[in-house]
Amino acid sequence: MKGSEVRVENVEKKFGEFNALKNVSLTIRKGEFFSLLGPSGCGKTTLLRIIAGFEDPSAGIVCLDEDNVVPLPPDRRHVNTVFQNYALFPHLTVFENIAFPLRLKKVPLAQIKDKVFRYLELVQLKGQERKKPNQLSGGQKQRVAIARALINEPSVLLLDEPLSALDAKLRQQLLMDLDLIHDEVGITFIYVTHDQSEALSVSDRVAVMSEGRVLQIGTPYEIYEAPADTFVAQFIGETNLLKGTITVRDGRFYTIDTLDMGPVMVTTDRAFEVGDEVVHAIRPEKIAITKQRPENLPPDWNVVKGKVFESIYSGFQSRFDVDNAAGYRFKVYKQHESYLEMGPEIKWTDEVWLSWDADDGYLVESTRL
């Protein structure tokens, strides 16, 4: 496996009285595509800059493999960074921008040419080598920045919101290309983003951050399907949250008395006890919506009656906001799996029934930062 393991242990960072990072610890495996995900100001870029060597931690250590690199300057860490604003030299051609790190190391010209053209092909810019940055699109500029960062063959590539300046369609294309580049070079990628769809689509694992802390680390599937707390549940996609108290525990099955719906059944492998205050979460796409009350459902299904407050048709699916008798507003997604000759069956103000399997919900604790 190429690349280096990155180990962050008990890292803190203070800017005056402001504590940007609070006892952060995590391990990133060799060759992993690892994302730091969170809202603006959560500390993810500060953590990336500490790994790169652009900031010193107030406490804690950063190890590449077994070596603590905190005392080392950035150019001795075998780590390269791709920035949001490209940081290209405007007076140099694409070729010269990519070749710049090799020229600093006084690599022979023949080797430089061979290597630059190899990386031009990797980032799909062959034929663009004589252009200046002002002749390139935003996506092409970022590809040049990626090639320049990779040509030194670092063991870790750090990417600080590299796609945020691009439009949505181009961002999605370059994200897929970035995933292919990672597969090709095989080194460790650490990717900073505030966009949960980006992190979920390409990462081997994700660390969700908020207010200087790491709240959960897991695969995209684990983060989405089993969020650790209410912050992660709400930040990763959309979800319905019902606060309540556990009244019955029967193996994996729990009954929660909720304020907004009454008794709700859910299964979980986490350790909760009768009397615990919890939050039941259910994703909008897990909820079935029908105009008639569903019949012959298993006993572990939850059913609630409601009225459509808002209906939004978006082609492949419809989104419904549905109010129940207690005034709780459910978010529900209905996939359009077949041709709708007369348009969506369920419309604004319709009375409807919502239902979901106890296995499709999950229990989380309220976020305490």
Image (spheres, rainbow, N blue to C red):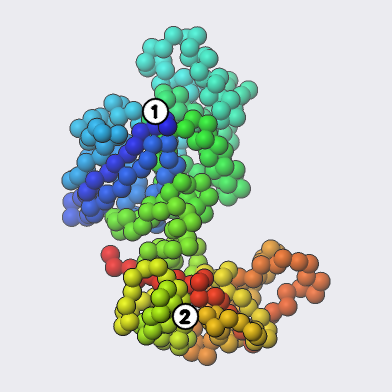
Residue in front for this viewpoint, 9 or 41: 9
Horizontal arrangement in the rendering, residue 121 relative to residue 64 (left or right): right
Q: Where is residue 307 shown, x and y percent of the image?
A: 60, 86
Q: Which residue position is annotated with label 1? A: 154
Residue in front for this viewpoint, 89 or 208: 208
Callout 2, which amino acid?
Met
Q: Where is residue 96 shown, x and y percent of the image?
A: 49, 19
Q: Is residue 364 above or below residue 7?
A: below
Secondary structure of the residue carrying tag 1 is loop
Residue 74, by quadrant, is top left
> Which residue is rendered at x = 33% and y = 74% of the image?
272
Residue in front for this viewpoint, 64 or 194: 64
Q: Is residue 271 above or below residue 201?
A: below
Report whether residue 344 is seen.
yes
The Cα atoms of the two marked residues, 1 and 2, are separated by 51 Å
Secondary structure of the residue carrying tag 2 is strand
Q: Which residue position is annotated with label 2? A: 265
Q: Which mark is residue 209?
A: none
Residue 277, by quadrant, is bottom left
Q: Is residue 143 above or below residue 46?
A: above
For disc 1, the neighbor class at 10 Å (few under 14, some 14 to 19, many from 20) is some
Horizontal arrangement in the rendering, residue 195 relative to residue 365 (left or right): right
Callout 1, which amino acid?
Pro
> Which residue is rendered at x = 58% and y = 50% of the image?
168
Q: Where is residue 159 shown, x and y percent of the image?
A: 42, 40
